[in-house]
Structure formats: structure tokens, C-alpha cells
Image (cartoon, rainbow, N blue to C red):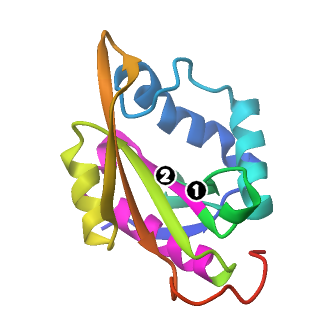
Amino acid sequence: MPDRRIRDATAADAAACAAIYAPYVTDTAVTFESEAPSVADMALRIEGAQRRHAWLVLEEDDAVVGYAYAGPFKERAAYRWSCEVSVYLAPTRHGTGGGRALYEALLARLADRGYRMAAAGMTQPNEPSARLHAALGFEPVGTFRAVGWKHGAWRDVTWVQRPLGDATAAPAAEPT
């Protein structure tokens, strides 16, 4: 078993995160981006997520092998207690529990910051992602049919969500 730890990402992790993400962009329909972001672009994404939400990396034996992050769910003010979450692992780390560990840490961090709902979109089909989200308490809320065109086909995206804390009480403060 490798030595594993989860920590806050920094700009120094941008190259590793970009390398993990690139095959998802170029070889799959998991993400609808058509060009893999540069290391500089990934560093800006990490910085932006750290300001209001969170970006965590999973290290195994001192190498970054996965990451999870959150960002705004929507831009309107009433949505500010909700966020969208994503997790990506190096292909050799699928099925090792890394995605679950990253998400558990991320969801706890978001709850501590005052967020009340986490949502995730999954391009279909993606049974491993559906199982991960279900295991972590996400519930399906709907599917957008044929919403994205990638790799020569229209793709559906299923959305799931889960509460972060008491979903019925008024928020105590702005998320930090």
C-alpha cells in the first residue's frame, strides 16, 4: 500500500493536475473541454478554486495521483451556498479508493466553509462515477439529454446532488 495523503493544492501542483486531466479531455467524453488546459491555466484554476471553495490533491509516495475541487454551481447570488464538485484520478489509480478519499475530504472542507449543497454532472455512460457518487450520498436529480457533442456523438449528462449539513435551515453566514 502506498503512503497516501490529501492536502491543499498549490500552483506547484498544476503540472501534475494538468497531466492527470489531459487524457480525460483528449480521449474521453467525461469532460466537455476540447483542449487540455496548459499548466499555467491549471495554476489559475487552482488559485481560483482555493479563494472561495477548495482544490485538494491526493499524493501517493510523494507524487500527485489525483485531485478534487469545487467551484460555483451558478453565478446568481441565491446559489452562493451551493457548489459544483469534480474528481479526477490518474488512470492507474482507478478503483483504489482515491476518488472516495478525495471527495470525503473535499465535502467536509466545503461543509466547514458554510456550503450547503454539492452537485456533480456526469457524462453518460459512466457507471464508475455513478457508483462513487451514490456511495457518497449523492442522489440523482435529472439528466440533460444530448446536451454535449464530443467524439462524434451527442452526450447526456446526469446531475446528482447531496446536502452538506442541514439542507432545511437558513444559512448562518456567507460561505467563506
Q: Where is residue 40 in the image (x, y as percent from the top left)?
A: 76, 31
User: What amino acid type is highlighted by mark number 1?
Assistant: Tyr
- Taking the spot 71% from the left edge, 54% from the top edge, the residue there is 49
> Could you say which disc has been placed on residue 18 in the image?
none
Q: Nearer the viewer, residue 19 or 125?
A: 125
The reply to whether the C-beta atoms of the residues labelled 2 and 1 are less than 8 Å apart is: yes
**Image side of residue 51 versus residue 150, left or right:** right
- Taking the spot 51% from the left edge, 18% from the top edge, the residue there is 34
Segment colored magenta? 83-111
Of helix, strand and loop, which one carries label 2?
strand
Q: Is residue 154 above or below residue 175?
A: above
- Taking the spot 41% from the left edge, 71% from the top edge, the residue there is 162
Disc on the earlier residue, 2 or 1: 1
Q: Name the residue under label 2.
A: 86
**Label 2 to label 1, Cα distance in Å?**
6 Å
- Taking the spot 53% from the left edge, 52% from the top edge, the residue there is 64
Q: Name the residue under label 1.
A: 69
**Image side of residue 93 versus residue 169, left or right:** left
Q: In this view, does 83 lie above or below 111?
A: above
User: What amino acid type is highlighted by mark number 2?
Assistant: Ser
